[in-house]
Amino acid sequence: MAGKKATTTITPGEFALSVNDPGYVHPKGWVYVPLLDISTLATGHTPSRKYPEYWQGDIPWMSVGDARKVDGKTINKTKEYTNSLGIKNSAAVILPKDTVCLSRTASIGYAVRLGQEMATSQGFVNFICGPKIEPKFLQNLFLAERRFLYNISEGTAHTTIYYPEVKAFNVALPPLPEQQRIVTKLDSLFAHLEEVKTRLEKVPQLLKDFRQSMLTQAVTGKLTEEWREQNPQQNSRSLIKTIEQDLEMTYLRKCEEAKVLGNRKPKDQRKNKRSDKGDPFLPGVPSSWVYKRCEELSYLITDGVHHKPNYTESGVPFLSVKDVRPFKVFVKSNKFVSENDHQDYIKRCLPEKDDILYTKVGATFGYAAKIELNYEFSIYVSLALIKPSKYLNSSYLELMFNSPLVFDQARFKVSGSGVPDLHLIEIRGFKLAIPPSEEQSEIVSRVEALFSKADAIEEKYTSLKQKVENLPQAILAKAFKGELLEQLASDGDARELLEEIKKLKEETKKKK
């Protein structure tokens, strides 16, 4: 069906000038020739599922999905098999080894080479290479021409290359020795690229492991061992006493305010019911540090709205678990609630600058981020809100909550067989390793410096990964412009090759 093409990932800028484009000039010794002058066209077919005998034989059958799984490499086996007798009745065609199969539907221009006799679905248009044509050369040529092949396809929901366009397709053909040398060079380059990709694939995990290792060392005191030697008088006892006094004064002030307003006495957040789950093994920390329960360091630990809000097209942002990732708060869901609802929600849970948001529901539980947004918002029940004492460094707490030390506790205490759920009673009981105030600042500074280096490496990795992904098309472009290898006089002229092919075809016709 003709019409506007469906959305595709093909980017014209990634591809070379097609040999079918006006202005293309083929290299010396090459010849511009219709594709069907050097190959035989064969169609694909899907045998009917109504007849089981069509699917119980020993002839492999390939769909476009099978080809995509092997990323354009030679196909030797597929999941389903057709019957050698029934295949004639099913209208499928047995294709010889080294047939080049071009996807004409799902992934326009995707090409694979058969490693044995096989049949294909109608999603392919198949080319049986003529004599003195290197099959892998033709396969790579199709891969190089994906932009052009996409441009000649038609369709709305599903783009398709129709057979008239296939029959009009032209190729720039070099002499056979040059074809073979190009294929050998491409094989070598692509093998090297695969090695590079394999190494690059390890980088994200290495960076993740590095960051987790730094966080572990940060919150267990190993990162600042040298600093403590230079500052032996520092300890966290006075800090903990200050925090306890701060929480007590804050609670007494709230009680006084409630009395003046005629409200009932507020709940003391330090006297919540405690979990009976116990704690996992906690690593040792320096003698100048101390472990304290999260609720012993916070004004309030609560969560967001427990019912589904009435969303509006605009208004006050409403954040959920999707909007929080380690060290980051960002609005991904773009959901809003009315100002009236927001005012009602913040009576119980008011997120403010330097508070900690912590994901507590779903597969992404255990992510923490310090609030640095400069506007008001409300949160859903999937997020916990931790309001630490003003005498604690919120950036240090952010490191702590994202570290393996706290995540191991979260994983130990999480509930739910289907959807993980961290209850507030468990979060309040998290044991946090608290160093002196100055050491907290030193830890934050060192971790930020190390993470900055990791971020720079990650940025270089992302750039390199993109270049490596674009390299195959750049290499193919050079190959089919005749720029990949030096041309040799001994290769001969492709016009002579074309004459040989014509003679061999005529002889074959006479023998038949």
Image: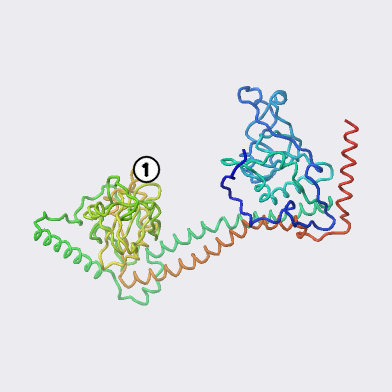
Image coordinates for residue 448, horizontal then vertical, percent: 42, 68
Above or below: residue 139 compared with residue 297: above
Q: Tag 1: Cα neighbours inside 10 Å, few (<14), some, or many (≥20)?
A: few
How was the colour assigned to the protein in this rendering? rainbow
Residue 485 horizontal side relative to residue 455, left or right: right
Image coordinates for residue 187, horizontal then vertical, percent: 72, 52
Above or below: residue 169 compared with residue 52: below
Q: Residue furthest bottom?
A: 230
Residue 292 horizontal side relative to residue 499, left or right: left
The front one of 195 and 472 is: 472
The front one of 480 and 370 is: 480
Image coordinates for residue 47, horizontal then vertical, percent: 65, 27
Position of the N terminus by quadrant: top right
Q: Which residue is mark 1?
A: 419
Position of the C terminus by quadrant: top right
- Rendering quarter of residue 75: top right
The front one of 234 and 80 is: 80
Say which residue appears at 88% left-offset and 42% top-offset. Answer: 502
Residue 238 horizontal side relative to residue 333, left or right: left
- Name the kind of residue labelled 1 in the image: Val
**Secondary element at image label 1:** loop
- Rendering quarter of residue 101: top right
Say which residue appears at 81% left-offset and 45% top-offset. Answer: 133
Image coordinates for residue 246, horizontal then vertical, percent: 20, 66
The front one of 204 and 382 is: 382
Total number of numbered discs in the rendering: 1
